[in-house]
Image (cartoon, rainbow, N blue to C red):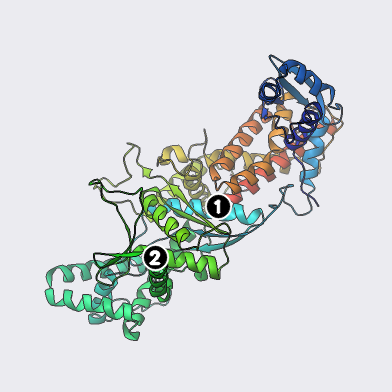
Amino acid sequence: MASVTSLTATVHQRLAAALTAALPETADADPLLRRSDRADFQANGILALAKKAKANPRDLATQVVGGIVTGDVIKDIEVSGPGFLNITITDKAITENLASRATDPAGRLGVPFTDQPGTTVVDYAQPNVAKEMHVGHLRSAVIGDAVVQMLEFVGETVVRRHHIGDWGTQFGMLIQYLDEHPHELDHEDAQVTGEEAMSNLDRLYKAARAHFDSDEEFKTRARRRVVDLQAGDPKTLAAWQKFVDESKIYFFSVFEKLDMEIRDPDIVGESGYNDMLDETCRLLEESGVAVRSEGALCVFFDDIKGPDGNLVPLIVKKSDGGYGYAATDLSAIRDRVFNLKASKIVYVVDARQSLHFKMVFETARRAGWLNGDTKAEQLAFGTVLGKDGKPFKTREGETVRLVDLLDEAVDRASAVVREKAQDLSEEEIAERGAQVGIGAVKYADLSTSANRDYKFDLDQMVSLNGDTSVYLQYAYARIQSILRKAGDVRPVAHPELELAPAERQLGLHADRFAETVAEAAEEYAPHKLTAYLYQLASLYTTFYAECPVLKADTPAQVENRLFLCDITARTLHQGMALLGIRTPERL
């Protein structure tokens, strides 16, 4: 089945055609269609077009109205003020369009696939080996996962990449310590949990660090080990692999708590590009993109200067022969462009790294790796703040462990579910508590535009009121309850029926789902989808209060209102799934 043309798109097409007929010289005239409080839509584009054509805006508006056929989709169109158009849609068109979405055989609610799908690499969820995940790792994971789900849903080929921190000088220290204390990471029980894996690593890291700081001979041995690691010494690599494997047990347990799928083949850390570093540097130097400066290989930019006014370079290779992050990031771009054939690369990375990525992307452009065929951009995100508006820390000033945060969210949510639950077992309360708690954390993150900071306030997140995932989950569960109570009466669309104002508002908004998903996916903007879903749940709440469903006046009206309930629930379910949030059938 072809995708369903939304009412917005249909009205836009008809107005644009009437405008072009009235002003033949203005091809592709945009009527600037907006949702309106006065009617269903308002077209504001005529004033600017009339000015351009040196015509009277009201006369032009009247001419456009004369060229519009009413009756099937457009019920009424009138000129308002200096040349605005107020447009009302027929009730029949609203119901018919929703019925087309409901019967989409692919179950996509009429959401179209993108016209020109490409291959997008999304780089997100990048924890560090042998280190605990903290609240700062939350946003990259949650935002990245939603972007991946939305892109895949509209038909883009998505390659997921988790660029974990698994290389660098601290591994010399850790490997040497493990070499001298060989049984530190041995497991008696094969089924080690993520928590145990992390506490093993944490204990080992602290012991190695203490040894490194207090014993000069150990420090020397540890530094030699870094050289061995970079040279690919088999024994050193085997010890390093132990750290990576232990860390992955922990990572997977945290991502499972977050209800996120992270696949092992998608984890390509810094170490994955080691074999390319030398060639990357050679290509940059031979092409003149990078130059030697004080023994280091650097790329300079006219517009990037330090406080002293001197140019600040991107250091690709240090004067001691070691490689910086830039060499790894540039090698990753080469891999993503030439091996993965990416048309777009999206980096879901903290805004504080914006300057680094600006320099890396510009270097890759100068080298010819990023060009018209492949674009790279950073989806930069802001900081997680505490209730006090300062970066989120524990009372002791420590960074908050992500696991502790998620556990507390689930505890709070379970209390809310228990309070409301009427016929749920303890097991069901625990399951729903996890779905509500994790959903609350994800939604709070996603409902804020990525580039803004947001306050982490669990009380607000698990509230049943306001813009929270719990509010949406309860709306969905309430609809499921009504559909169960309806028994043998099925949802059926009745286009012949007149709609009450609350039914019309709900129907018009439900019809905008496809264009919202397309826009959110194209702009990597999950917050646009959360805003849409919150409004959908709010309009449903008004509909529920004003329009009795099972006690409606006629059997046809009962069926039609059940149909509105059903399409709303399916839209909420699909929209929340794209955000990585569960919608329990009962709450």
| Residue under the point 73% across and 29% down | 503
Q: Helix or strand or loop: what does disc 2 sit on?
A: loop
The amino acid type found where label 1 is placed reads Val
Question: Mark 2 or mark 1, which is nearer the start of the sequence?
Answer: 1
Image quadrant assignment for residue 249 = bottom left
Q: Is residue 290 visible?
A: yes
Q: Is residue 194 above or below residue 419?
A: below
Residue in the foreground of this view, choosing between 354 and 487: 354
Residue where numbered disc 1 is placed: 147
| Residue under the point 32% across and 85% down | 235
Q: Is residue 193 visible?
A: no
Q: Quadrant of the C terminus?
A: top right
Residue where numbered disc 2 is placed: 288
Say whether residue 172 is left or right of residue 167: left
Callout 1 touching callout 2 (CB < 8 Å)? no
| Residue under the point 26% across and 74% down | 172
Residue 574 placed where, x, y %?
Answer: 65, 48
Residue 334 placed where, x, y %?
Answer: 48, 67
Residue 198 placed where, x, y %?
Answer: 35, 66
| Residue under the point 30% across and 53% down | 312
Question: Tag count in the figure?
Answer: 2
Residue 461 placed where, x, y %?
Answer: 46, 40
Q: Residue furthest top?
A: 81
